[in-house]
Image (tube, rainbow, N blue to C red):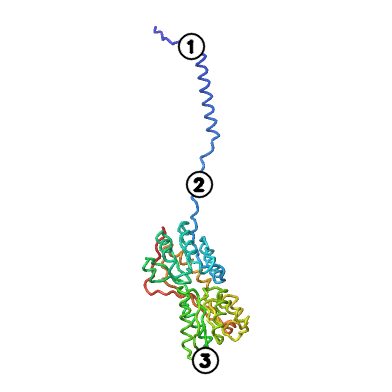
Amino acid sequence: MTHRFTPRSRPPSRGGRLITGLTAALILLLLAACDDATPPAAAPAAPATARPRIALVMKTLTNPFFIEMERGARRAEQELGVELLVRTAAQETSIEQQIGIVDQLIRDRVAAIVIAPGDSVELIPVLKKAQDAGLLVVNIDNRLSPEFSRKMGLLGVPFISVDNEAGAYAAVRAVTAGVDRPTQAALIEGIRGAANADERKRGALRALAENPQIRVVAQESAQWKIDEALTVARGIFEQHPDVQILFCANDMMAIGAMKYLAGTGRSQVRVIGFDALEQAREAVRAGRLAATVDQQAAEQGYLGVVYAIKALRGDQVPPETMVETRVITTDTLAGAAPPGPPVPRQPGPAQPAPAAP
């Protein structure tokens, strides 16, 4: 008979019992942890696409014209879902401040700059710097010098404004067409060298020259400013007291000149402005201002932002768009139709603005 040998087990030692107990406790703890564990958290959702940041750079907000321009840009901001940053210099002559603003916007990495430059030449180098950094540039209101832009390599910049020369011509023509006796005229200009100021001066002089009864006896700049215009008007009328027609290249200067004229009892002088500010419209209604020009500042601001977004998307935009002007007189305020839509001008194929980074 075969005998199978079964070894007799020994009772565990005290040390063995301790290890076995610890092992069992550890297993129980791990099982409990698995039972209580919560599912891993879901990966965070991707952040929503940031709204493109568009900067509107204007000359100042001391002129209501630019408040209207901002209003139009804000409308585009709401419609297009962009983030609009509005930056302005202290005065229309604060060119260095505008340059500094553009420099800061380059550092801030905005997507596009929509600018109404205070000067047609001096802003070009910093705008070229912005374009080289990948920012889109849209020019509104005052045209950047095409010649100097080409020289500096600032290309593909859409321009939105009005035909300043045609607007000034039409306003002056409306006032002077019936002049049939020898009459002296004077001009108060904007900033000399700024394209819009020079264009308005040319339009006014052309209209005055068409009437052989009118002689221009003075041309002075008041830098777009109301107080300087009052001072300039004083100087003009002290030297030429018989002036009967006064063209001012914007309404702010016209308001300054009218203050001087009202204080000296010269109510017979026919003053012509440009911008159709509400205060100027009120002066037209009251008979103190002979005419002004509505250049749709809000529409320029609106289109500037619209064109910036289109260019960012790679869409073609017209190289030049002219917003319609309208001469404001007592007759037109009585019920004439509002200005028409902007008219794109495409002397050549429209070019897309440089791509954003």
Q: What element does badge 2 sit on?
A: loop
Q: Is residue 71 above or below residue 211?
A: above
Identify the residue position indicated by label 1 in the image.
10
Identify the residue position indicated by label 2 in the image.
44
Residues packed near mark 3 inside 10 Å, few (<14), some (14 to 19) or many (20 plus): few
Q: Could you tell me which residue is drawn at 52 percent across and 87 percent down?
A: 184
Identify the residue position indicated by label 3 in the image.
182
Q: Which mark is residue 264?
A: none
Depth check: give the residue in front, 14 or 300. 300
Q: Is residue 32 above or below residue 63?
A: above
Q: What element does badge 1 sit on?
A: loop
Q: Amino acid at mark 3?
A: Pro
Q: Nearer the viewer, mark 2 or mark 3?
A: 3
Q: Could you tell me which residue is drawn at 52 percent across and 23 percent down?
A: 24
Q: Residue 311: name its quadrant.
A: bottom left
Q: Amino acid at mark 1?
A: Arg
Mark earlier in primary sequence (2, 1)? 1
Say left or right for 230 vs 118: right
- How far across and how far down the image is residue 324, in percent? 49, 77
Marks 2/1: CA distance? 58 Å
Q: Amino acid at mark 2?
A: Pro
Depth check: give the residue in front, 258 or 196. 258
Mark earlier in primary sequence (2, 3)? 2
